[in-house]
Image (spheres, rainbow, N blue to C red):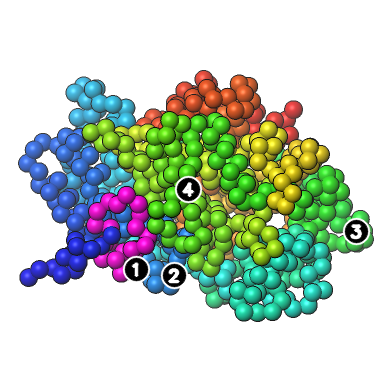
């Protein structure tokens, strides 16, 4: 009897073959399910053929064959997980919960296939022998990475421990999905609906227009404020109504806390403890040791040394910064006024106005989204010669999304990039870059081009005005576009070695490097024009931006360090976490905490980066990479901000190489030496 489902997939499923573009116009929840189920069967057959091959194991018939297996499964699962973040639905979330155990079981079946591992091990031993000397560095690293991947996935465990390893990975995959789903639902569940215009005191017209449009979308009169960043941030910064600031603040910090509808507290405990158990099963003392064995930092000791060095360097300045804001609040409200967490953004904004005559609303008119896109794309053209051409042929997954063909200076196709800029209830908060297709060179020399996507949550346009960005949002776009350049400039032979497939504490270098241009006058002058008049940003305003560059920079650093500390403290535990999460946070944050916290709050239950994302025992990467990016940008400061030769070297030695060499070797090839922290301290005004 024919397998009718398989026949259906073979004949019409859009994931059956690799298409020119990801076929979003044909994607349904049902054909994702079909492609994953049949894709697992297909890859199982490919693995079986690989293992039963009577020929001696070689790089080509084992490691390369393994990499090339599972094409349909990879295409379908990539779309499912990317859309879960960018354009989800109840049906897609249900599908992910249904598919997660199947995918985890399938992955475990591959990593614990004894026959397959023995073939990989044989190739590894050959590569390490004199006979393997002719291998390219890329292929050698691919062999090493494949072998280590099996080791880290339970292949060398005693048979009696493998069932528990399978159970742990199964549970972690489902818990991560549930954590993210709860966060999204908790964010969407809250709305602050105002009908009295007096409650809008202090809010800029643009913010009120956004809130009115949000209310109209829900069929309501008045103004609607949500926990999405473009709504929440401006309200707590500008609203004169302290009680409403407090109300919105509490709604935000209580998301997913213990006892609420979308409680993540037990999920956090389970994730931390299961990761600890997994690492210890594999012979590591703690989960951080397991993770950091494949990172530039190398050890938790090195991470804590960096975080503590940053605390020592930045805390004195941060203490003074907070005291300055408190003093401003007392000047405005009286000497007995006690500033609370929901007041911080408000009075910090007032102080910034006083000191620099600057706030984000003054710069917004000069940053209409389309001009910012033109400016960021234009920066890439200036540095690297690449150009961007709208692609109207490519299917899209949402009307907000746009696609662009990326071309080399001579017109040769380089990549495809999707842009997705506005918040919606189907999208997770934050900003990220992801990939739908990898770059790789096949044996015929054909370059398979990467397809990348940058996803943001910027303020939407209103009937009165276009989408206008803050200076910080421009920086966010530069950051994610830096990740995109890393993916687009990939030029490797093996598809799992290119682009952003590098160590997590190296992957933030290209993104944070691009942020350096945000405060360079020449860059701002290239695109910052008033959305109504077309007038360039006044030089006086640029000067004020530059003078304010150090405003609260130390407080911002300590905030990031506090997240890194919490992450490391969770994942250096060697015994199960039994402590109350809030108490654990207090203890972890003691070296960085400058202001009292709301007793009911708990950040861990919302900390998607380290719970459901890929940054568990890796959040320090942002600060680690800041040392690198500040030092790397120093080369451009020395040789010319837009020096094409320096940019070409940065692309050639670092952006194009992916994981084909050790990260520090790539950095030294570009910079000529190892980095040091001095450039970061000087950039932040901590050290002259």
Considering the image in quadrants, where does the N terminus appear?
bottom left
Q: Residues within 10 Å of mark 4 (few under 14, many from 20)?
A: some
Between the C-alphas of marks 4 and 2, the distance is: 28 Å
User: Which of marks 2 and 4 precedes in the sequence?
Assistant: 2
Q: Splitting the image into 4 quarters, where does residue 411 fall? A: top left
Q: Nearer the viewer, residue 185 or 110?
A: 185
Q: CA distance from mark 3 to mark 1?
A: 56 Å
The residue at which mark 3 appears reads as 332
First to last magenta residue range? 15-36
Pointer 4: what residue? 390
Q: Which mark is residue 89?
A: 2
Image location of residue 665, percent across then percent down:
44, 26
User: Does the magenta-highlighted stretch encompass residue 268?
Assistant: no
Do labels 1 and 2 touch, CB within 8 Å? yes
Residue 464 percent location from the top left of the image: 70, 63
The residue where tag 1 is placed is 29
Residue shown at 24%/45% (left/top)?
68
Q: State the quadrant of the C terminus.
A: top right
Toward which corner of the image does residue 55 lie, by quadrant?
top left
């Amino acid at each position: 009897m024919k397998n009718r489902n398989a026949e259906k997939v073979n004949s019409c499923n859009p994931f059956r073959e690799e298409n020119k573009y990801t076929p979003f116009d044909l994607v349904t929840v049902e054909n994702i399910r079909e492609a994953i189920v049949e894709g697992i069967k297909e890859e199982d057959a490919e693995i079986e053929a690989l293992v039963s091959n009577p020929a001696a194991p070689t790089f080509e018939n084992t490691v390369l064959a393994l990499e090339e297996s599972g094409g349909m499964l990879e295409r379908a699962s990539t779309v499912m997980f990317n859309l879960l973040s960018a354009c989800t639905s109840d049906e897609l979330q249900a599908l992910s919960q249904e598919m997660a155990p199947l995918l985890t079981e399938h992955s475990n079946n591959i990593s614990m296939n004894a026959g397959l591992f023995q073939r990989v091990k044989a190739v590894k031993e050959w590569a390490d022998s004199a006979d393997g000397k002719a291998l390219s560095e890329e292929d050698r690293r691919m062999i090493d990475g494949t072998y280590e991947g099996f080791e880290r996935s339970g292949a060398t465990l005693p048979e009696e421990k493998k069932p528990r390893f399978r159970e742990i990975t199964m549970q972690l995959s489902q818990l991560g999905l549930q954590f993210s789903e709860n966060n999204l639902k908790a964010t969407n569940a809250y709305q602050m609906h105002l009908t009295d215009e007096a409650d809008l005191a202090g809010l800029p017209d643009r913010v009120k227009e956004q809130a009115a449009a949000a209310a109209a979308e829900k069929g309501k009169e008045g103004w609607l404020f949500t926990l999405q960043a473009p709504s929440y941030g401006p309200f707590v910064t500008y609203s004169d109504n302290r009680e409403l600031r407090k109300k919105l603040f509490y709604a935000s910090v209580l998301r997913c806390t213990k006892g609420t509808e979308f409680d993540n507290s037990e999920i956090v405990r389970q994730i931390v403890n299961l990761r600890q158990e997994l690492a210890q099963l594999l012979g590591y003392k703690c989960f951080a040791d397991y993770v950091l064995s494949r990172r530039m930092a190398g050890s938790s000791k090195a991470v804590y040394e960096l975080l503590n060095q940053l605390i020592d360097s930045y805390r004195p300045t941060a203490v003074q910064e907070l005291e300055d804001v408190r003093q401003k609040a007392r000047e405005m409200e009286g000497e007995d006024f006690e500033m609370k967490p929901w007041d911080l953004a408000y009075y910090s904004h007032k102080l910034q106005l006083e000191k620099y005559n600057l706030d984000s609303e003054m710069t917004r008119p000069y940053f209409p989204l389309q001009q910012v896109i033109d400016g960021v794309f234009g920066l890439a053209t200036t540095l690297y010669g690449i150009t961007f051409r709208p692609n109207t042929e490519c299917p899209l997954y949402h009307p907000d999304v746009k696609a662009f063909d990326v071309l080399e200076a001579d017109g040769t196709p380089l990549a495809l990039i999707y842009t997705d800029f506005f918040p919606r209830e189907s999208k997770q908060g934050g900003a990220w870059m992801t990939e739908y297709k990898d770059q790789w060179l096949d044996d015929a020399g054909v370059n398979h081009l990467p397809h990348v996507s940058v996803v943001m949550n910027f303020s939407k346009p209103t009937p009165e005005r276009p989408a206008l960005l803050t200076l910080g949002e421009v920086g966010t776009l530069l950051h994610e576009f830096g990740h995109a350049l890393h993916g687009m400039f990939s030029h490797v032979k093996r598809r799992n070695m290119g682009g952003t497939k590098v160590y997590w504490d190296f992957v933030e270098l290209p993104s944070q490097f691009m942020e350096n241009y945000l405060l360079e006058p020449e860059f701002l002058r290239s695109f910052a024009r008033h959305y109504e008049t077309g007038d360039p940003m006044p030089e006086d305003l640029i000067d004020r931006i530059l003078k304010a560059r150090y405003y609260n920079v130390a407080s911002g650093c300590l905030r990031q360090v506090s997240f890194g500390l919490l992450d490391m403290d969770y994942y250096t535990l060697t015994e199960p976490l039994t402590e109350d999460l809030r108490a654990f946070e207090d203890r972890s944050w003691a070296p960085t905490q400058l202001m009292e916290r709301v007793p009911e709050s708990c950040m861990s239950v919302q900390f998607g980066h380290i719970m459901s994302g890929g940054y568990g025992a890796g959040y320090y990467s942002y600060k680690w990479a800041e040392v690198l990016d500040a030092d790397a940008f120093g080369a451009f400061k020395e040789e010319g901000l837009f020096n094409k030769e320096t940019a070409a070297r940065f692309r050639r030695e670092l952006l194009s190489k992916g994981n084909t060499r050790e990260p520090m070797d790539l950095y030294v090839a570009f910079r000529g030496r190892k980095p040091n922290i001095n450039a970061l301290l000087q950039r932040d005004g901590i050290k002259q």
